[in-house]
Every structure is written in C-alpha cells, then in structure tokens.
C-alpha cells in the first residue's frame, strides 16, 4: 500500500500490512468482538479503512460500509438494521454522527477512530483510538499466541464476507450479503480479463463502502499483489493520480464524463494555437481508434499522423490527466455515453466496458481486441447467462450474492428456478456473443403510441455536452412524447456567459436565461440526431438547482432515484405535457456571490425543440 499525507508519499510493506490487520483484529476480539458480529466502517479511502475491513473479516465478523456523506439518520438505519456492535470511523465528523445517535443504538459497544484531530478533548468511554486498539491486540497476542491463525483457519468460503447496502434507486436501501467465495470469484474473473501483477499500480478512487471498490480494486490488489495507492484528499485525486501514474484505472461513467469535461475546459482556456491543434489532430485520433476497434491496419500516412498527434497533443494531455502509463481503462456501474467512449479512445486510451452488479457480481466485459462501442463485452469466465422472452437477463455463477439481509421475501423474488438471478436489466446478445445493455427493464420507456425508448442512453448522450451536468429523460404510456429535466454545468455555463458578456447573479438566474436555453437546445438537437424520430426529446426544462443525494434525488453513487424524482417534480413534468403551459413557478433557496443566503421565487420555463 502507498498513501499520501501532508504532500508526502508513504509506503507499507506486506509485512507491515499484515501486522496492522493482525493486531487490530486481535484488539477488536479483546474488546468483545465475536464471530458473526457486524462492524460498520465510515470514512475516506485511507489504509485504516481497509485494515479495519480485513481485521473484522479475520476475526470471523462481518464488515459493512457507510458512505462518508451519509447523514445521522442514514447512519442510524444501517447501524440498527445490521445490528452493528462496533464502528470504525475516520475522524471527528464521523464520530459525532455516532455520538448523536447513541441513545437509539444501544447495541453499539465501541466507536474506533483513526484520525484524532479534533477529538483530543473527547473523553467519552464509547470512543477508542485505532492505534490504541492495535496495542491491545499486541498484548492479547502474547496471551493467546495462536488465536489469529486459528480464527483465519475457521473461516469458510461460504461465510459472509461483507454486507453491502445498495444505492436504493427505488426506495430504502437493500442489504446484499456477499460471501468470501463471491468476492474472490468476481475479482479472479476480473483479473483474468485485466491481468495485474506485483509491478502494477492501482488507485483507490471508488467509495470504499461501494461493492465496486471490492470487485475492481481492493480484492484484485490482494489476489495479484498490485500496489494500491491512496490519494490524500478527494479534492486532490486528479493531481495525485498524475503523481501515481496508475497502470490500470476503472472509473464510473460520471467520472469519465468528468474527464471529458476536464479536457473540454482545458481546451477552452488554452492558447488559440493549442485549440487549433486539438481541433486539427482529434479527427486523426478518431480515425485511428476506429481502425483499431474494427481490426483494420491503418496505412503508413495515418500511422505517421498518429505518432505526430500523440507526440504533440495526446501524450501531454494524458499526462495532465494522470493517465500516461495506463495500459487499460474500464468503465462500469451504468451506461457510458457513446461520444465519451469514442473520445477517450481517440486520445489513445484503451477503454473497455464492464458489466457487473452488487447481486450478480462480474457479468461481462470487453477483452483485448474485442472492443465494440455498443456492447459491454462477452460474459465473464464461468458465468452463465440467458434471456427471457421479455428480454430480461438471467445470470448464474459463483460471483452472486446469497440474498438480502433480513428480507427473505425480496431474496426469494430475486431468484428464478434453478438458481438464476433476475438482473432486472433489458439486454440483447448479438451473434458475436456480446451483451448489449439497453436499460433497466423497469426504466425502459414506452410512449402512448407504443414507441419505446431507452432513457439512460439519451441521458448519457446529453451529458456528453460540456454544458449539461445531468439529465432525467421522461415519458410513459400516458404521454405523447419524450421530455427531459436538465441540470446545467454551472462552471462551464458561467464561463460561457462571461465570455459572451451575459450578466447573471445566481445559479437560479443563469439557468433560466433564454440564451442558456438556446445553448442547451443545440445539444438536445444534437442528441436527437442520433435517435429515431418518435423517440426524440420534444420539450425540456432547465432545473433551478442541481440534483442532490441529500434530497433523495440521487443515490450516493449518483444514480437517479426516478420514482422520487417523478413525485418531487410532478407539477414540472406535467407542465411539459400540457399544450398551453409555458412555465411553472417554484421557490428556490439561493446563495449569492457574497455568501448571503435567501429564497427566491422563480419561473421555470418549458422549452420546446
């Protein structure tokens, strides 16, 4: 492991790593942790998070993760639902959440923190410091010299390794139970597709509480011996990634869209000569990417142009992004916009699609030389797939979860006869055996006319715009056309406004300007050009605020909570389907540039394409 603290990189050897896990595990046992107990962990991606996780597992207990931005009520739900007996937390902010809910979580024995800053004057018996627990473990080891190895030997592949609270796009969170076999099978299948070794550098950039971190970073790191690197702060990930120079990266679609947005911002601010070079050389990148992906050998002229483009533009650009050493890059979690996928390939990064879920594990992925823009690759090794008559994908493998914690009814409904897991995803499988992901089956849209459309596909295309941060595409069997609620990217749109001498005061003010609506409409029309006529976006509104996880509009992994959004913005949605409606009045909290806060009443205008 390697982590950065106060600007300096520090390394831990495997021996040091082992000792931290061993003695912290024994320290927990000395405090009363028992086999099968649940331990909640919350904090930033730092070594202590993972030492804690593995220490809990080594004792035969079960870790569960909580997202760092969870509010006390969310923490309380997970702690009580999972019957957490110990908590491992990052700092004062996270410790305070547990102290706030202590009266409602009587089963909690200890809250152990690893960053003592701000906690020096806390003298609560519920609290303990991480390093103090390690010292307890060293003392316990002297009294029970073989207990750690005995605990490890008693753990079976079918034992629960982790309880993952899923993002809950349809309501309350679900707690998925994954065994050691499921985690190791998923990570092993992944490493088979994406070879890693002890000389490889990985970066820990996914939320540690999310299953994707275990599937595609933490457990592959353990299996392959690859070095796992931790950025200093979430705000320094970009700069730290450049210093690390990882050989392999896996980002979610929102992160790749952020990379593309970063490229576009850099080009907007670049010297006119650089902007011209980028516009001139990018088509070369696209041409060579298409040749590589179609298996064609480019001619001598294009090879020469490619080397010139790489030397002058793409290699320096990849270096600025921290991706200069990347051998292979992956996207997963949800649909990535085709435009984003192509641009990443054009600058010389081999980006592959990956398809997995908390419940089904590793389902499919591109292999080298078999990358197709429209697919998520072939099924993973030892993974069985089949399609139902309705087009739903069923999966069966050792990667699957065993069920939902404390919810037998939901568990039973998730499996079909023969042990097949119902993914709930609408897919096709082409003649080459590649899986074509369409959308969640429940989210596939159908208009009154019977015309079907894929909301996620359209949303992904819209987010390729530098001016659109997020979007929710609408339409159902009672509606005549497709509509959209759009979030502007404030940093990009405000820069455009300043460059075009458009005055504004707040986000709310800027979002409702006609000039901004015209700017966004151009991108909506661009996306419509890729769609069949009757599934094109006919009307849209620009929301006065960003979608917010704290208002239950997004999950913690930034997926849309569509049900909640339909209910919250019902009046706004209905207005896009009433012929005479042109605007809806809403009250919106605002923060002015001088820091003052207030509430304004604004009219959100319905725009027609």
Image: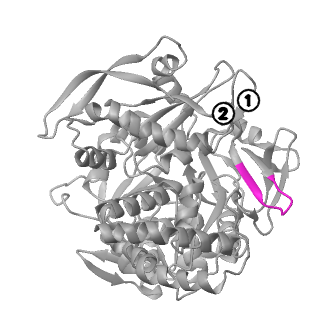
Q: Quadrant of the N terminus?
A: bottom left
Specify the label residue 117 is tagged with. none
Q: How crowded is mark 1: few (under 14 residues within 10 Å), some or many (20 or more)?
A: some
Binning the other alpha carbons within 10 Å of mark 2 as few (below 14), some (14 to 19) or many (20 upward) gives many
* Range covered by the magenta-colored residues: 429-437
- Of residues 62 and 141, the one drawn nearer to the viewer in this rendering: 62
Question: Does the segment drawn in magenta span residue 419?
Answer: no
The secondary element bearing badge 1 is classed as loop
Q: How is this picture coloured?
A: one colour
Q: How far across and down, in percent of the image, does residue 391 sit? A: 81, 42
Q: In the displayed structure, would residue 388 be above or below residue 216?
A: above
Image-based side of 504 in relation to 312, left or right: left
Instruction: Report if the CB atoms under discs 1 and 2 are less than 8 Å apart.
Output: yes
Residue 451 disc label? 1
Q: Which residue is drawn at 47% across and 46% down?
A: 558
The image quarter containing residue 353 is bottom right
What is the x, y in percent for residue 222?
56, 77
Residue 82's spot in the image, x, y percent? 53, 46
Residue 78 visible in the displayed image: yes
Given residues 2 and 334, the one toward you in this image is 334
Q: Residue furthest top?
A: 580
What residue sits 46% from the left and 13% below the top? Answer: 581
Camera-side residue: 224 or 155? 224
Q: In screen coordinates, is 343 left or right of 467?
A: right
C-alpha distance separating marks 1 and 2: 7 Å
Report x, y in % for residue 70: 39, 45
Answer whether residue 59 is visible to the viewer in this image. Answer: no
Element assignment for label 2: helix
Indicate whether 583 appears above or below 275: above
Task: Tell me the residue that label 2 is attached to.
Answer: 535
> Upstream in the sequence, badge 1 or badge 2?
1
């Amino acid at each position: 492991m390697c982590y950065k603290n106060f600007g300096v990189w520090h390394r831990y050897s495997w021996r040091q790593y082992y000792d931290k896990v061993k003695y912290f595990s024994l320290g927990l046992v000395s405090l009363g942790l028992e086999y099968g107990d649940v331990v909640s962990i919350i904090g930033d991606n730092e070594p202590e998070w993972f030492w804690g996780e593995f220490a809990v597992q080594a004792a035969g207990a079960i870790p569960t993760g909580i997202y760092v931005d969870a509010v006390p009520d969310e923490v309380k739900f997970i702690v009580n639902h999972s019957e957490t007996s110990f908590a491992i937390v990052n700092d004062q902010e996270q410790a305070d959440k547990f102290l706030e809910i202590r009266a409602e979580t009587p089963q909690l024995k200890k809250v152990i923190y690893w960053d003592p800053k701000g906690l020096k004057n806390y003298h609560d018996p519920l609290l303990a410091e991480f390093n103090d627990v390690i010292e307890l473990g060293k003392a316990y080891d002297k009294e029970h010299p073989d207990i750690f190895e005995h605990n490890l030997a008693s753990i079976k592949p079918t034992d629960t390794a982790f309880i993952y609270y899923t993002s809950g796009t349809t309501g309350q969170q679900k707690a998925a139970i994954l065994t050691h076999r499921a985690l190791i099978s998923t990570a092993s299948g992944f490493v088979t597709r994406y070879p890693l070794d002890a000389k490889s550098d990985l970066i820990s950039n996914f939320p540690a509480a999310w299953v994707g971190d275990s599937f595609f970073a933490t457990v592959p790191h353990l299996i392959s011996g690859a070095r796992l690197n931790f950025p200093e702060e979430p705000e320094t990930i970009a700069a730290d990634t450049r210093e690390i120079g990882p050989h392999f990266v896996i980002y979610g679609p929102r992160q790749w869209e952020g990379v593309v947005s970063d490229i576009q911002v850099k080009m907007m601010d670049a010297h006119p000569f650089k902007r011209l070079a980028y516009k001139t050389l990018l088509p070369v990148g696209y041409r060579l990417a298409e040749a590589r992906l179609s298996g064609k050998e480019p001619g001598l002229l294009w090879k020469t142009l490619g080397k010139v483009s790489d030397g002058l533009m793409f290699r320096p650009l990849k270096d600025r992004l921290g991706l200069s050493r990347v051998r292979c890059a992956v996207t997963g979690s949800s649909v990535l916009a085709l435009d984003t996928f192509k641009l990443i390939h054009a600058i010389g990064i081999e980006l592959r699609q990956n398809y997995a879920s908390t419940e089904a594990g590793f389902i499919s992925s591109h292999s080298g030389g078999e990358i197709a823009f429209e697919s998520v690759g072939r099924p993973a090794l030892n993974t069985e797939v089949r399609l139902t008559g309705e087009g739903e994908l069923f999966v069966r493998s050792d990667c699957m979860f065993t069920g939902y914690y404390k919810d037998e009814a939901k568990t039973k409904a998730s499996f079909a006869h023969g042990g097949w897991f119902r993914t709930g995803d609408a897919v096709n499988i082409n003649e080459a055996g590649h899986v074509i992901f369409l959308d969640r089956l429940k989210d596939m849209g159908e208009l009154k006319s019977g015309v079907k459309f894929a909301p996620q596909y359209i949303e992904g295309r819209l987010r390729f715009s530098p001016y659109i941060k997020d979007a929710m595409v609408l339409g159902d069997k009672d509606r005549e056309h497709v509509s959209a609620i759009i979030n502007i990217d404030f940093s990009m749109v405000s820069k455009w406004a300043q460059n075009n001498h458009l005055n504004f005061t707040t986000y709310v003010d800027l979002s409702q300007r006609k000039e901004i609506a015209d700017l966004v409409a151009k991108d909506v029309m661009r996306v419509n050009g890729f769609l069949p006529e009757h599934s094109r976006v006919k009307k849209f509104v620009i929301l006065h605020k960003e979608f917010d996880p704290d208002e239950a509009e997004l999950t913690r992994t930034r997926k849309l909570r569509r049900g909640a959004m339909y209910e919250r913005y019902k009046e706004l949605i209905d207005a896009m389907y009433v012929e005479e409606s042109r605007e809806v009045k809403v009250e919106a909290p605002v923060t002015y540039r001088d820091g003052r806060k207030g509430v304004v009443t604004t009219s959100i205008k319905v725009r027609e394409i």
